[in-house]
Image (tube, rainbow, N blue to C red):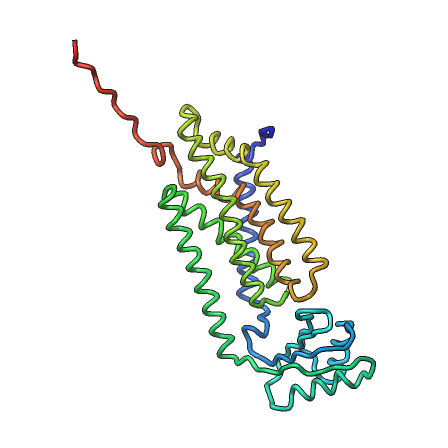
Amino acid sequence: MKVTNIPFMAMRKIVAIFSITLILISLGSLATKGLQFGLDFTGGTLVEVTYDEAPNLDDVRELLGKNGYGDVVVQNFGSSTDVVVRMANSYTPTLGDEVLSTLQSDGTNKVLLQRSEFVGAQVGEELREQGGLGMLLALAVVMIYVAVRFQFKFSLASVAALVHDVIITLGFFSIFEVEFDLTVLAALLAVVGYSLNDTIVVCDRIRENFRIMRDTEPYDLVNESINQTLGRTLITSLTTLFVLVVLFVAGGEAIHNFSMALLVGIVVGTYSSVFVAANLLLALDVKREDLAPAPKEELEDDLP
């Protein structure tokens, strides 16, 4: 594959301003608007029904809305005839039957109630706490691994790039008021792993080039390393994005937010692996001495 010669590091100041702006906007939205937590986190009632024939989910939502169930999430579950209705209403023993009666009032499709259950607010709060702890644990493990495998400056740059990706992805969900549920949390953890993979590839090439290109300044060496790995990074990201676009368009509402989080996260992660991590390495003044072992002194042969 032909190696490009794009002056990425010449744009480092512009990129830094752009990233900082996105982070500030995201943090501002998270502080003022917060996230639109789904029923997995806030608590509520789940009603699962089965139709004889696949219903139109928009018609189901409209029917429920007309009968006083405005704040509902209607999704297919398992098959096109199985429908899950999630609502913020407090649970009552008769709520499942009431929803069933509402759905049957349409009269065009036979409906059977499969189950009705309640997720308490305390359970939702525990899920939020566990999800946050899981994210922090993942970042801590990443920092330790990269510090051991590479060097501490690489560890700081990699984790900072991951935090950058997570904050901007969360900011996207906050700004556009997209529901944040357990599938989105799972997608965020997947984004952390995916973005780290791309960043590790770039860091590994930088480390190797420090050992090979001994007369090259860190600025030029980092730029050359990014160009050498650019083809691999773009091919990996584009093939993944093609699959995610298909999932987003045709995967159904159940994984809509999941695929959206991955789409945003992978785009941001690809950008950060090229610009952010390398930019931070230069800001941390990474040097050849940080990685390359000291040259061994040659033993003089005292034999005649």
Image location of residue 9, percent across then percent down: 52, 35
Q: Quadrant of the N terminus?
A: top right
Image location of residue 218, percent across then percent down: 44, 31
Quarter-of-image position of residue 233 = top right
Q: Which of the two residues, 304 or 20, is positioned nearer the viewer here?
A: 304
Q: Which of the two residues, 232 or 88, is positioned nearer the viewer here?
A: 232
Q: Which of the two residues, 288 or 183, is positioned nearer the viewer here?
A: 183
Quarter-of-image position of residue 55 = bottom right
Q: Describe residue 136's horizontal placement relative to residue 47 as left or right.
A: left
Residue located farthest toward the front when viewing the structure as drawn: 52
Residue located farthest toward the top when viewing the structure as drawn: 304
- 193 up-or-down from 200: above or below: below
Q: Quadrant of the C terminus?
A: top left
Image location of residue 253, percent across then percent down: 69, 66
Q: Describe residue 23's horizontal placement relative to residue 73 as left or right.
A: left
- 101 up-or-down from 5: above or below: below
Question: For the image shown, how many numbered marks are present on the structure?
Answer: 0
Q: Describe residue 168's horizontal placement relative to residue 81 as left or right.
A: left
Residue shown at the point (70%, 64%) measured from the top left = 252
